[in-house]
């Protein structure tokens, strides 16, 4: 009985890994070699794109909370993550990447990363320091912006 549980768990992990790292590539991703998420360049376009971002990002029409979030994001997050959350080589990863799909990194994970900082765990950019001075409402709007852009790029 125990060997069947272990076999099932191994199969589930393999399927999850394939889905997370090899199944689909969003805009700006080539999918090849993306299994090693510790490598900042894994699967990312090597050519710089608009705004110096690491991946090409399709921007949706924004309104309400997402539009306000774009303004807050560009004022507090863009220096590292790029103006459209496409990442900056040597600075910070693209948030428009399937690793940040809501089912893997929920809204609370983004909120806590901004409030408390986060240890480097998917990329080799180093630790992210806390972002000072953001209110809860501003963070809610920033998350709405990130999610709207992710959705426009096939990440949902």
Image (cartoon, rainbow, N blue to C red):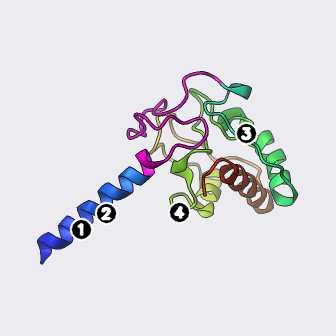
Mark 4 element type: loop
Position of residue 155 measured from the top left corner of the image (x, y, whole percent): 60, 52
User: Which disc is residue 58 wearing?
Assistant: none
Mark 2 element type: helix
Label 4 Cα crowd, 10 Å radius (few <14 / some 14-19 / many 20+): few
Q: Which residues are magenta?
A: 20-48
* Residue 68 vs residue 21, the one in the foreground: 21
Residue 50 is a magenta residue: no
Given contact means CB atoms under 8 Å apart, are the residues at marks 1 and 2 in contact? yes
Query: Which residue bears the numbered disc 2?
Result: 12
Given contact means CB atoms under 8 Å apart, are the residues at marks 4 and 3 in contact? no
Q: Which is more N-terminal, label 3 or label 4?
A: 3
Please say whether residue 65 is visible from this viewpoint: yes
Picture residue at 63% right of the left edge, 47% below the top? 130
Separation of residues labelled 1 and 3 (CA atoms):
40 Å
Mark 1 element type: helix
Query: Which residue bears the numbered disc 3?
Result: 84
User: Which disc is residue 103 wearing?
Assistant: 4
Main SS of residues in magenta: loop
Mark 4 or mark 2: which is in front? 2
Please say whether residue 135 is visible from this viewpoint: no
Mark 3 element type: loop
Label 3 Cα crowd, 10 Å radius (few <14 / some 14-19 / many 20+): many
Query: Which residue bears the numbered disc 1?
Result: 8
Separation of residues labelled 4 and 2 (CA atoms):
16 Å
Image quadrant assignment for residue 16: bottom left
Position of residue 48 measured from the top left corner of the image (x, y, whole percent): 63, 23
Given contact means CB atoms under 8 Å apart, are the residues at marks 4 and 1 in contact? no
Residue 42 is a magenta residue: yes
Mark 3 or mark 2: which is in front? 2
């Amino acid at each position: 009985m125990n060997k069947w549980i272990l076999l099932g768990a191994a199969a589930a992990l393999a399927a999850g890994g394939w889905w997370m790292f090899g199944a689909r590539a969003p805009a700006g991703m080539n999918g090849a070699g993306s299994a090693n998420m510790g490598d900042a360049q894994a699967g990312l376009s090597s050519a710089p794109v608009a705004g110096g971002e690491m991946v090409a990002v399709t921007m949706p029409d924004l309104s309400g909370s997402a539009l306000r979030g774009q303004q807050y994001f560009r004022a507090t997050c863009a220096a590292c993550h790029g103006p459209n959350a496409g990442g900056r080589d040597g600075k910070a990863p693209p948030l428009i990447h399937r690793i940040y799909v809501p089912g893997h990194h929920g809204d609370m994970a983004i909120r806590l990363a901004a409030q408390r900082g986060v240890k480097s765990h998917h990329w080799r950019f180093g630790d992210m320091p806390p972002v000072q001075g953001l209110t809860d409402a501003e963070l809610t709007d920033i998350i709405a912006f990130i999610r709207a852009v992710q959705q426009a790029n096939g990440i949902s």
